[in-house]
Amino acid sequence: MTATIIDGKAFAAKVRGQVAEHVQRLKDEHGLTPGLAVVLVGEDPASQVYVRSKGKQTVEVGMNSYEHKLPADTSEADLLALIERLNADPAVNGILVQLPLPKHLNSDLVINAIDPAKDVDGFHISNVGLLGTGQKAMVPCTPLGCLMMLRDHHGSLSGMNAVVIGRSNIVGKPMAQLLLGDSCTVTIAHSRTRDLPEVVRRADIVIAAVGRPEMVHGDWIKPGATVIDVGINRIEGRNGLFGDCDFDSCAEVAGAITPVPGGVGPMTIACLLANTVTATCRANGLAEPQGLTA
């Protein structure tokens, strides 16, 4: 069997197109232009590239982009003061503080200082709690992107067995909550899971988000299963980026699979833009954009 390749790049372009349509509607019908503020502290090269890409795509869909670049030695008090100003700014509908932060800053304290209604990363403890109890929340971008691709490929996910490999607060746990919300039977697996390959073999859907290159092999995969590879890894002595799955062997068995790169990655920023539109609609008592939320 040769797996269908789920093209995250093409799907992300489609999502951005939908976002742009909603943004234009907000402008035309309500005089509103969504605004996304991104805060970058320090000179981390990967973060700088990511922030540039976010800013560029924000402008391309017609939203306002506000970038705040702060030196690495910025004090916690100064960073919190900036967040307070952004919380109070009606032109800012979404706030994202780029992680990781320099070690002298308390990430939890900083994230939880963001107004939960503007927390387009979905990391605020209030949004975590709302998602965990099945209520309306801002949903973390990467899991939301995975869910969108799964819904697009399968239609209904009801009754499917899903295994999430990885229990991080950013991907693993919220991904499991989203799958439960779509009536999957969900197992969260991790480094202490006994006989992990056998657990994975029972899954109709496999979400690999553990951060270990090529850990999941084709003989772990149930024939015809859908594999969503969230991993982005480098391997010493080899060029390029590698997922958490051994792509070639998994693609021989799976029914569908996301590549790395070009799978989940492009969806993360697309969903950030979608969340900003959702936040704008909620703040103004308007109907939320269909197909862009969980």
Image: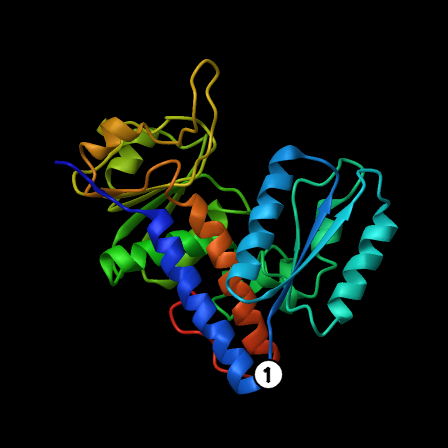
How many marks overall? 1
Query: Outermost residue, left direction?
Result: 1
Q: Residues within 10 Å of mark 1 (few under 14, many from 20)?
A: few
Q: Nearer the viewer, residue 196 or 11?
A: 11
Picture quarter with the N terminus: top left
Q: Amino acid at mark 1?
A: Gly
**Vertical comparison of 197 with 89: above or below:** above
Q: Which residue is mark 1?
A: 31
Q: Residue at x 47, y 45 (%)?
A: 172
Quarter holding the C terminus is bottom left
* Residue 2 appears in the figure: yes
Q: Residue at x 69, y 72 (%)?
A: 91
- Residue plotted at (46% across, 20% down): 235
Q: Is residue 221 left or right of residue 114?
A: left
**Percent from the top left, x then y, of residue 241?**
43, 29
Horizontal side of residue 42 vs 137, given as left or right:
right
Relative vertical location of residue 157 with respect to residue 207 in this rendering, above or below? below
In this rendered view, identify the residue nearer to me: 175 or 53.
53
44 horizontally vs 75: left or right: left
The coloring applied to the image is rainbow
In the image, 139 versus 75, the foreground residue is 75
Q: Which residue is pictured at 68% across the width and 68% down the height?
A: 92
Q: Is residue 131 visible?
A: no
User: Could you tell me which secondary element the residue under label 1 belongs to?
Assistant: loop
Q: Is residue 21 left or right of residue 169?
A: left
202 shown above or below 191:
below
Query: Would you place residue 124 above or below residue 263 in this image?
Result: below
Q: Position of residue 290 (x, y in %)?
A: 40, 73
